[in-house]
Image (cartoon, rainbow, N blue to C red):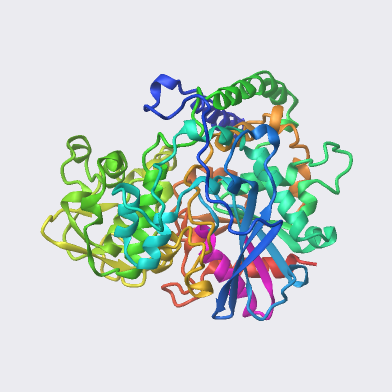
Amino acid sequence: MKRTRAAVSIGTALIAAAGVTLAALPAGAAGPAGAVHAGAVPAQASERTETDLGSADGLRLSTVRLHVPLPADVGPHPEACDYIGYDRYRTADGPADPQRADAVWVMQPGAWGSAGNQDSVARNTVRAAAAKGRHIEIWNLGRRGNCVTDNTGIEAGWKAKDPHVALDYYYGGKMVGGKRFEGFKTDRDLAFLSRIGVKQVVTDQYELMRRELPDAAFRRTRTFCGGPSMAGIITGIFGAWDFDGNPKTTDDAGYNQCAGFIALDTLITSDPVGLRTNPLFKIVTDKTLGVAYPEVVKRIEDGTLPRTFGFLPLINPQALNLYKMAGIGAYHAPNAETDLNKRLPASLDPTLRLGFSRTYGDFLSGQNGIRDFRFTNAALLGVLTDNNTTNLGLLQVSQGALGGGKVGAKTFPLPGQAASIPFAGDLLGVASGVSERVGPTDPKALYTWRNYDDVKGVPYTGPADEVSDQRDLARQLGDAGSSSGTNGANGSNGPIGYWEDYFPFRVIVDFGAALAGTRTGDLAAIQHADAVKAKPTITFGADSSAIRIMRPFLPKDTIRVPGYTHIDTVNAAWRQNNGRPEPISAALADFLIKNAS
């Protein structure tokens, strides 16, 4: 009963969150439908294009785009949004035809993530399988929301090896290639995103898999589905989805497109505690959330509720763009002192205060802010994204430690030790993570960064708790959006990017409603939940994850990964501090090889 109530509460909370009134949102967060600014139009209008990004270290990387127009009732939208795509990872000496590979893993991204977010786990798993003499492919999907992000400045900054180029494009009014930034989009510009929910996400994956892997038997026996975080639930929904509208015919069902499932710090399920199998709870859900869900959807569509998360600091488009700019500097000039933190516009103040403040006094007064200290480029990226420095648990990557100056413990919004409080700790850890956090205290010192493999002697962390290479993270962030594949398999993570900057609010509403048992409207096609459970599944749980609250729901055979944060499950380095290869990718390679038939 406790688990049942927990699942209902989670879904109810997400639906309730969607009920925030317009008056409570910042100006411009929501509004009536308006004209949509044209996004980047693909250079070559074709049913399918594959751009080869080169090969290195036995790995070949390319990006595939498919022309799959949105339904007419979505309304006006940029032409670029009529394309779906993925970054394709495979062995350089493997077959060109994916249906001749030993296995293919189709990976959904987590919330706010995109294909580049999962670059490390894709590379590592292909390498691990190749070491066993097997050729596998991994396809990192990019959702349609990427089509409205203007990465012109990021791409120009990456090519110039200078984050100031990006900063000047987005905030200084400077043109790049004759193009001037039109401004970060508001909900008024993005009415069509109100129609981009879970149904569109799973339909896009189904269409992509059918086109790229036309042999139904190959999909059923050698194609695997899954991903990190939200992607696990989305994959569970995909597996339970009935795509032809007739539950009695199952060749089209999502679970028959996958030989097995992969969960990275998440669950593969659409109904974690069996709400739809309990007659009483089924009735209660249908009479409550089943009625509320269509009303919430209407409010998103008419603009009363937000269409994206632009009203939230830390994960709004400006904040996500900041992490990309920091990645450019950290990759190309990691040890040079940066002035990027001092030149950031006032519009980023909410993000900077929430993410950087060391105490409540600092947060309320604005003192000892990120502009008051000196950093190298690498240290700036670290304080924005590391698990021992940044204040939002879901953004944390265990990539090293601050050097060069004194630090003090962070108590805002909660000290990391709060996660150890009995009963409440796992819930509190969602806010600020589970690790001890520190911030700089000396405004005269030049703070540097010690990478994940150089943390011996650091009092608040150690080699066993640092698993991700900041160089990888910097490349993945800074090269986001590069349509040229600047460094090929040697560096570029492909043109789809690291973040989905304008992540649709509708996806989270659908996600929460589905978890809580809603099966009306666009969620009525979730019909085959039990069939998903019969497939081979591998699940990983990150011991330092900010969402340890879901531990009671994880299966008994979950593989625990010590020292990993939530994002580390897709970002960990190939070589770990214990001298051994990355454990998740090694286990994944074994799972794919064993279960492909």
Q: In this rendering, is residue 99 above or below 382?
A: below
Q: Which residues are magenta?
A: 116-139
Q: Main secondary structure of the magenta part?
A: helix
Q: Does residue 137 show up magenta in the picture?
A: yes
Which residue: 33% across, 46% down? 391
Q: In this rendering, is residue 279 above or below 125?
A: above
Tell me: 123 left or right of 369. Answer: right
Mark yes or no: residue 83 visible: yes
Q: Position of residue 488 (x, y in %)?
A: 52, 72
Which residue: 66% across, 48% down? 235
Tell me: 558 left or right of 303. Answer: right
Q: Does residue 191 show up magenta in the picture?
A: no
Q: Nearer the viewer, residue 348 or 536?
A: 348
Q: In this rendering, is residue 571 above or below 552?
A: below
Q: Nearer the viewer, residue 177 or 260?
A: 177
Q: Is the C terminus in the top left, top right, bottom left or bottom right quadrant? A: bottom right
Which residue: 24% across, 53% down? 341
Q: Nearer the viewer, residue 594 or 97?
A: 97
Which residue: 37% across, 45% down? 318
Q: Is the N terminus in the top left, top right, bottom left or bottom right quadrant? A: top right
Q: Quadrant of residue 248?
A: top right
